[in-house]
Image: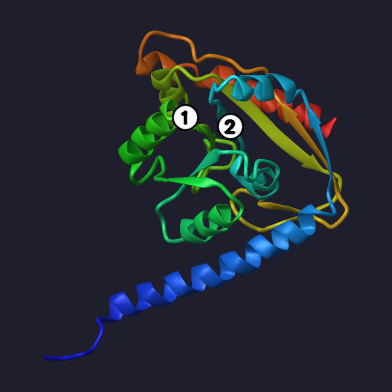
Amino acid sequence: MSDEVPAGDARSARGARRARWLSLVGAWIIRMLGVTWRIRLIDVRAVDALRHEGQPVALLLWHGQLLPLLYVVRFQSVAALVSTHKDGELIAQTARRLGCKLIRGSSSRGADRALMGLVRTLRDGFSVAVTPDGPRGPNRSFAPGALVAAHRAGAPVVAFCVHASRAWYLRSWDHFMIPKPFARLTVVFDTPRMVPGESGRDAAEAVPLFLERMALVEARAAG
C-alpha cells in the first residue's frame, strides 16, 4: 500500500497551514494597528440598546471596509459571514482570531447554507456582520441574502461604514482599505430598520432602500 499523499490533498494541507500562519500574523498586525487608531463611533447607542436587550441585529458593511470594522466589533458576540472560497479562508481565520463567530457561505457558492446559517445565528441571539457585495463584487453591489435572513429571523438591519483619515488601498476589486497607524476612524451607524414586506421576495425588493441607507452613512462618515 502506498504512503503517498494525493497531490490535491497535499496542496490543500499546505494552503491550510499557510492560512493559519498568515491569519496569526494578520490578526497581530490588525491589533497593533488598532491600538493606534482614534475611533469615533456615531449613532451607535440605538444598536447598543437593542443588543443590551438581547435583540440581535444584522450589520451591513462594504467588503472593502471589512478590516477596520472587524476590529471595531471584535469580541462583541458578532458572527461574520465569510466566503467558502479558498481566498476566504484567510479572512475567516483572521476573523476568528479577533473573536468573531463564523458563518461560511456566499451569494455565489453555498448561498442556501449561508442563508440558513444567518437565520439560525440571528435566532440564537448573535448579531451578524454581512458584506452584501462580497465575496467577489462588483464593488458596492448589493446581494439580498442578508435582508432575506433578517426578515425571516425578525431582526432589524443596521447599515454602518467607516472613513479613515489616512489609509492604504489595495488594487483589488473592492479597493480594500487598511487604515494607517494613528489614523482617525469615523464609524457611522444607521438607525435600525426592520425589513419591510410579508415574504422573502418582498425582502429582496427592499434592496434599493438599504442601498440608499449604505450610501447615506458612507457620506456622513466621509463628511
Quarter of the image with the N terminus is: bottom left
Q: Which residue is mark 2?
A: 60
What residue is rendered at 57% in x and 17% in y? Answer: 209
Crowding at label 1, few (<14), some or many (≥20) Cα neighbours within 10 Å?
many
Q: Which residue is mark 1?
A: 146
Is the residue under label 1 in contact with that under label 2 (CB below 8 Å)? yes
What residue is rendered at 64% in x and 69% in y? Answer: 25
Q: Nearer the viewer, residue 174 or 117?
A: 117
**For this view, does 174 lie left or right of residue 223?**
left
How is the model colour-coded? rainbow
Is 8 located above or below residue 169 in the figure?
below
Marks counted in the figure total: 2
Per the rendering, the mark at residue 53 is none
Q: Earlier in the sequence, mark 2 or mark 1?
A: 2
The location of residue 99, given as percent across then percent down, is 58, 50
Query: Quarter of the image holding residue 22?
Result: bottom right
